Image (cartoon, rainbow, N blue to C red):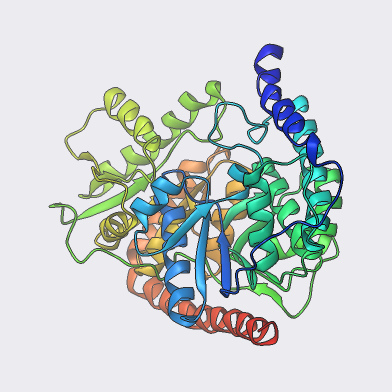
Amino acid sequence: MIKHDLSFIKDEIASFLKSLFKLFVFKKKHHMDLTKKILVLGGYGFGNCGDEAQCNATLKVLTERYPEYQIINLTPNVKYSKEQHPLYTHDFASRTMFFNKNRNCNCYDFNNSNIKKTVFLIKSLIIILNAYFVRADLATIFINARVAKLLYELKEASILYFCGGGYLTGDTCSRLWDGFLLCILAKIFKLPVVMSGQTIGIWNNAFNRFVAAFAFREVNSITVRDKEYSLNDLEKIGIKGVNHFYTHDDALFCDMSDEKQTQLKNYVTINFHYWGMAKQDKQIYIDKINQIINSLLENNDFEILFIPMKKTDKDSYLDYIKKYPNSRLHCFEYDYDFKKIRRAISDSKFCITMKHHPIIFAMGENVPTISLVFSKYYLHKNVGALAQYNQQKYSVNLEDDNFLQQFNTLFTELKSNREDVIKVISDAKIDLTRRKEKFLTIVDEILKVNN
């Protein structure tokens, strides 16, 4: 284990040695790019079609609203992002440029490795030091060309735009720390920062709370995708104000395929998965899911369509179907294009999901939904999302002893009041649209002031 943790340090030492010749600080010649730029970053680039829907909808809105700006999408996987979003410009994100994410040796995926965490923090301090050099047009030291390139991009940009998602939380720690660093760098360059449609918080420890308070305090606007949880966590670290409010998930109004995606006519879409579960818990949860599905099949004439949001979700469905075969169970087969999965959800009668983005697609298409929750992280994301559409009661905690009774009661209620529920969802989206326009008006003013 120790050998594995230390393997990435060779690259860091090599980079350090290569930079020694630049120890004498001198004026650095750099061609100033006068193109007006908006830098966009988020939690996408990993094959999750919900995250790609957020990315695509954001790039589309910004491109249409600010045609005089070059919109640059910062992604950890440029090749993949070009395939998913071919109409837009892509470059590598900080997790790749600064910390070698997606390379064999990196200090980004630190998980529980204290050694990698320490290297991450040391590298961050070196990057911060060099940001001051870049700001003064001085030579950089102890960093390679990749790192310097992104620092100059940040220096020359007009705004840094955090696309929505659930990556700025204590449960996604490396992404949270990456966000801290970028906000600190933005302060150095006096670069305005906005955050759109975030699930943010769940700090988990005092260090995260301290750095979040320092790094996020001067963000120009933070909008979140739940009414209560994220704003409460921000308030706990002293961050609140008129420019911090809830809007909606950035994927709410993303595009949808015009073509039907399944021959099924009377079906319920279901998503469950293994992500975030301990190995010993997987069988417990799959048995609980089986009780819910059995109840659906016995008491209704619906077909069941399992909807994977990324390739690893499919493993849970294959395990389930193998253990509990039934001719009314189907797995949606597709190329993980968010427009197709949104259409499949749109044509379903109801949606039942552990993951967050099926909720968003369902709400966008007025499909009544029940969330399945098994941790604080999903309570924060899923129940918070449902609350925006006044649907927060339609959530089942799988850790409760009476989870099946909860589900049956809520599903019966949804069936009986389906049209009324759809009206409530539809009305809520009108207010959320106004709130998103309020946020974009703040962006308008920032760009007007800075240009």
Relative to residue 241, is residue 104 depicted above or below? above
State the image coordinates of residue 406 (x, y, percent, origin top left).
49, 49
State the image coordinates of residue 74 (x, y, percent, origin top left).
54, 55
Q: Quadrant of the C terminus?
A: bottom right
Which residue is found at the position 71% from the left and 13% from the top?
2
State the image coordinates of residue 296 (x, y, percent, origin top left).
31, 45
Q: Is residue 225 left or right of residue 115?
A: left
Which residue is found at the position 32% from the left and 47% from the top?
336
Q: Is residue 351 left or right of residue 211?
A: left
Between 29 and 87, the one nearer to me in the picture: 29
Between 122 and 152, the one nearer to me in the picture: 152
Q: Is residue 227 visible?
A: no
Relative to residue 331, is residue 36 depicted above or below? below
Q: Quadrant of the N terminus?
A: top right
Which residue is found at the position 32% from the left and 46% from the top?
307
Relative to residue 189, is residue 146 depicted above or below? above
Between 145 and 304, the one nearer to me in the picture: 145
Which residue is found at the position 70% from the left and 32% from the top?
15
Relative to residue 384, is residue 400 depicted above or below? above
Residue 369 is drawn in which quadrant?
A: bottom left
State the image coordinates of residue 433 (x, y, percent, origin top left).
50, 80
Q: Is residue 15 left or right of residue 294?
A: right
Residue 345 is drawn in which quadrant?
A: bottom left
Q: Which residue reaches farthest left?
A: 263
Q: Is residue 54 visible?
A: yes
Between 419 and 211, the one nearer to me in the picture: 211
State the count of labels. Answer: 0
